[in-house]
Image (tube, helix red, strand yellow):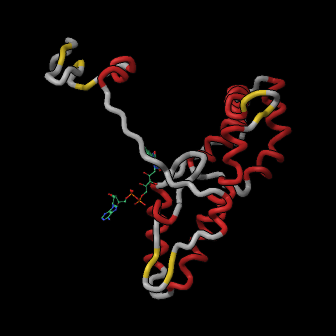
Amino acid sequence: MDSSPGLLPDGLPRRRGCYRISWSDALKQGEFYSAPVPCLSPASWKDNQIAGKRWALIGDAAGLADPITGEGIYFAFKSAEIVADTIDRPEQYSTKIWLEIGRELARAAHMYKRFYRGRFFGGDFKKRTVQLSRRSTTLRAILGNLIAGNQSYLELKKKLFFSIPSIGIDLITGRQETKAGFSPRL
Ligand SMILES: Cc1cc2nc3c(=O)[nH]c(=O)nc-3n(C[C@H](O)[C@H](O)[C@H](O)COP(=O)(O)OP(=O)(O)OC[C@H]3O[C@@H](n4cnc5c(N)ncnc54)[C@H](O)[C@@H]3O)c2cc1C
């Protein structure tokens, strides 16, 4: 295997058979694309019609993407599963989507502004959250579970409230191990 860095015909550096490219090269050479993630606002959730006579929307088409993480693949599969389950009871589809996905994403839509534009302890909310997480394993576990889909947005406030003592102990003692484990969704 060729381990010496070389240049591929298209100009990409090669090392050990893998394509490796630095950020500065990527910025110089790369073509950039973007695409919107269709996250609904709290107002849009109120009149989001996702099914009618002989039709139903799933995934992005139904606005089923998490406005905070941008995640939509799980919800696309989940809504496909729900549409299949309710194919002979189509009147139940919208309600099931709301109960199993919609109300969670609607809650996230309410939190969106606070998360991305809010202030916390006199600073940017995201920055402060990361700073606190670095010092608290309890908070890290909660946020890890949120991103992994194991912590619901609906229960987040309650979870954080009841974790205040544990987070406080983390901050005061610099404790590294807690019982609050991070468990990825498999
Ligand atoms: C940049 C970016 C990064 C993302 N990263 C993540 C991530 O890390 N994790 C995650 O969970 N989600 C991520 N998402 C969101 C995720 O990609 C979508 O939520 C998910 O793919 C939605 O699946 P879908 O089947 O509903 O729609 P799509 O995956 O968009 O599938 C719709 C398909 O329909 C086709 N189509 C459209 N119109 C027509 C037509 N008229 N006739 C025939 N075909 C048509 C399209 O070409 C497309 O292939 C990301 C989205 C973007 C834009």
Which residue occupies 80% across, 52% down? 158
Q: Residue furthest bottom?
A: 88
Q: Quadrant of residue 164?
A: top right
Q: Position of residue 171 (x, y in %)?
A: 80, 27
Residue at x 79% of width, y 33% of height? 120
Q: In front here: 127 or 3?
A: 127
User: What percent of the width, then of the height, locates residue 184?
Assistant: 55, 47
The percent position of residue 49, horizontal first and vertical second, equals 56, 73
* Residue 128 visible from this viewpoint: yes
Q: Quadrant of ligand 1?
A: bottom left
Q: Position of residue 76 (x, y in %)?
A: 45, 61
> Image height check: is 121 above or below 145?
above
Vertical arrangement, residue 89 with respect to residue 14, above or below: below
Q: Which residue shows up at 56% across the image and 82% down it?
A: 92
Residue toward you, 162 or 36: 36
Residue 102: quarter of image: bottom right
Going 70% across and 53% down the picture, which residue do you hit?
A: 110
Residue 138 lies in quadrant: top right
The one nearer the camera, 78 or 22, is 22
Q: Is residue 50 left or right of residue 26?
A: right
Answer with left or right where residue 151 lies relative to residue 34.
Answer: right
Measured along the vertical axis of the image, is residue 102 above or below residue 28?
Answer: below
Would residue 36 appear left or right of 152 to someone viewing this image? left
Residue 15 shows in this picture: no
Give the vertical position of 149 relative to 141 (above or below).
Answer: below
Image quarter of the N terminus = top left
